[in-house]
Amino acid sequence: MEEILPYLGPALAVLGVLAVVFGAVLALANRFFRVQVDPRQQRIEEALPQTNCGACGYGGCAAYAEAIVQGKADCDLCLPGGPETACSIGEIMGKEIAEFEPKVAVVKCQGSFANTFARFRYVGERDCRAAAATQYGQTACPYGCLGFGTCVWACPFDAMVMDAETGLPRVLEEKCTACGTCAEVCPKNIIEILPKDRYVHVLCRNQDPGKATRQVCKVGCIACRKCEKVCPVEGSAVHVAGNLAPAGLAAVDMETCISCGKCAQECPVNAIGNFRKLRREAKKQEAAEEAAA
Amino acid sequence: MEVGYVELAIGSILVSNFVLMKFLGLCPFLGVSKRTSDSVGMGLAVIFVMTLASAVTAALYRHVLLAGTAEHTNVLEALGLPLPAGGLVLVLKTISYILVIAALVQFVEMVLKKSVPALYRALGIYLPLITTNCAVMGVALLNTTDWRGSAAGLPVHKAAFNGFCAGVGFLLVMLFMSGIRERLAEARVPRALQGLPIAFICAGLMALAFMGFTKLFGIAV
């Protein structure tokens, strides 16, 4: 105790003076350097999860909040926050948030070992991007999956696996956050981020005429337009796009499609996939798990 | 012998680099080095704060904490206030430096926000992060320890220069690291090593390389 006492007074005095000086300087600075910030920005920042992950496309939650206030960004870009965050941001901005659409990555190729073949044996770097730079890749179909699993490697959430049987990547939909990393790295642009509540997708990207497609893949879209004809939606939700009559690729219109699955049944080459069963089961399982918990 | 400017610069940037030789400030080094643009912003912010913090803390050390000598006066003594033998170095050094750095960063942030909003946005979250950066505290403490037998540490102008050089050294390794990590993002890294583990391995290898600068030109700072 004796040893501390002589230090106590001066130490407290010095610290006290320092604190007062800095406090005064900061108070003055606050007065002179105050910047008016939209109060909504603060509230939006509080509503965001503060993970600063950048999934929204902005450098952190603060930058995203600023972009929203300035009207540069939509309210529903925060993936980790999900629908709740989108709703609360919408409330702050006084905007009605149309239902937050859960999305999922869809691999739009069915060129498995059984359905297609390789033009040559590729022995280079086991990476789709490298393979794609070598004569468009080794697959017979120039639009098809190269099967080296670059998307699987790229996935930050372990939500993709390579199916050893088919040689195609598979999306584990319960883990997928629709961040779009896989879609970005795929050199063939096979993977698309699509709404989860649309079950029917054309799982082919081949835009060649039917005959050429038929030669390279058993399940490639041949642009026969049967899907267009069978679609019950007025004006048809499936369209075979492409300028030339025989060329083209069917694509399902996400706005109007009712996911009835008739086109998937009708397709003569089974190029249209129906995810209804898969996702229904996943939902059931989830519900059962919740009930158990 | 007084330590010269060139010696200080080579010493702080290469020989005893704060990140790779002293292992200070590793959190921003690994956290902000994913993109080159980010790491340059962080590096510039660190240079700025380190220079200011070094100058202010060195002045504080010389003229408030340290008992007065023939070379430098103590403000408390000059005002006739009681000062314990040996000054207040032991009790106040760390805590007063924390106060100085925190207040300084806060002040700089306010000024930047008002006067140079572009720079403020570029620095973004890194500026407040520097408050808790041990490299800033480290350079402030090292400036005010024994330098070649002079207990008073570096004089204020040299302390500021040393802080600036330490910041430059930080920026340098941030640039190296972000370059490596931008390449790593494209490379196929084994799953178990993806992300931070491989970054740590790179940092270790870079530190090994920087070991080569030990006693460069006979400088051991």
Image (cartoon, rainbow, N blue to C red):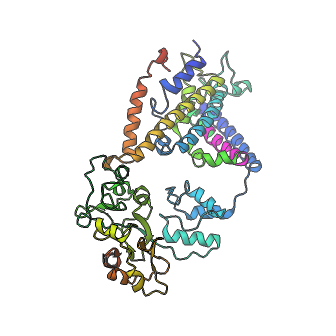
User: Most prominent secondary structure in the magenta stretch?
Assistant: helix
Q: Residue at x 65, y 30 (%)?
A: B55
Above or below residue B71? Residue A199 is below
**Which one is in front, A148 or A211?**
A211
- Total of numbered circles in the picture? 0
Camera sees residue A3 = no
Q: Is residue B111 magenta?
A: yes
Q: Position of residue B138 (x, y in %)?
A: 53, 32
Q: Residue at x 31, y 67 (%)?
A: A110
Q: What range is drawn magenta here?
A: B100-115
A152 left or right of A70 in image:
left
Above or below residue A96? Residue B166 is above
Quadrant in which the N terminus of chain B is drawn:
top right
- Name of the residue lying farthest toward the right: A32
Camera sees residue B13 = yes
Choose top left, top right, bottom left or bottom right for residue A152: bottom left
**Which one is in front, B169 or B129?**
B169
Above or below residue B165? Residue A74 is below
Q: Is residue A169 magenta?
A: no
B119 left or right of B26 in image:
right
Q: Position of residue B179 (x, y in %)?
A: 47, 39
Q: Position of residue B198 (x, y in %)?
A: 37, 42
**Which one is in front, A212 or A160?**
A212
Q: Residue at x 57, y 75 (%)?
A: A97
Q: Position of residue A212 (x, y in %)?
A: 33, 67
A37 left or right of B101 in image:
right
